C-alpha cells in the first residue's frame, strides 16, 4: 500500500468519527457512559429489573418513555418516587 493511500484512509477515518458527550447510564446506576445510553451490559440489567417487576429509578422510566414501541422493554410495573 502506498503512502498516499494510507494517508487518505487515515484522514477519512478521522473525519467520520464523532465525539459524543458522556451521559448517565439509562439503567439508573448513576455511572457515566461514553456517549451511548448504557454502560456495557446495563441494558440487560434494566431488562432484568423490568422482568422481575422491581422498582425503577426515574432515569430508567425516562428512558423507557422514549422507547415505547421497542419490544425489548415492557412497561414498568412500579416506579420509584
Image (tube, rainbow, N blue to C red):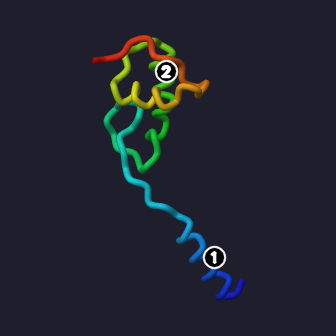
**Residue drawn where x is 70% and y is 87% of the image:** 2
Name the foreground residue: 23 vs 39. 23
Q: What SS does tag 2 mark?
A: helix
**Vertical side of 74 occupied by 23: above or below:** below
* Horizontal arrangement in the rendering, residue 55 relative to residue 68 (left or right): left
**Residue 10 placed where, x, y %?**
58, 76
**Residue drawn where x is 53% and y is 25% of the image:** 68
Q: Name the residue under label 2.
A: 48
Name the foreground residue: 69 vs 49. 69
**Residue drawn where x is 63% and y is 76% of the image:** 9
Label 2 crowd (10 A; few <14 / some 14-19 / many >=20) = few
Name the foreground residue: 63 vs 46. 63
Task: Locate the N terminus and report the quarter of the image it occupies.
Answer: bottom right
Numbered disc total? 2
* Horizontal arrangement in the rendering, residue 35 relative to residue 29 (left or right): right
Task: Locate the C terminus and report the quarter of the image it occupies.
Answer: top left
**Residue 35 placed where, x, y %?**
43, 49
Q: Earlier in the sequence, mark 1 or mark 2?
A: 1
Q: Name the residue under label 1.
A: 9
**Residue 42 placed where, x, y %?**
46, 33
Q: What SS does tag 1 mark?
A: helix
**Residue drawn where x is 58% and y is 70% of the image:** 13
Amino acid at each position: 500500500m502506498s503512502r498516499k493511500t494510507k494517508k487518505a484512509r487515515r484522514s477519512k477515518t478521522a473525519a467520520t468519527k464523532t465525539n459524543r458527550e458522556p451521559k448517565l447510564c439509562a439503567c439508573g446506576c448513576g455511572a457515566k457512559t461514553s456517549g451511548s445510553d448504557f454502560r456495557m451490559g446495563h441494558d440487560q440489567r434494566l431488562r432484568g429489573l423490568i422482568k422481575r417487576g422491581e422498582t425503577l429509578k426515574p432515569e430508567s422510566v425516562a428512558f423507557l418513555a422514549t422507547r415505547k414501541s421497542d419490544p425489548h422493554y415492557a412497561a414498568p410495573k412500579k416506579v420509584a418516587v
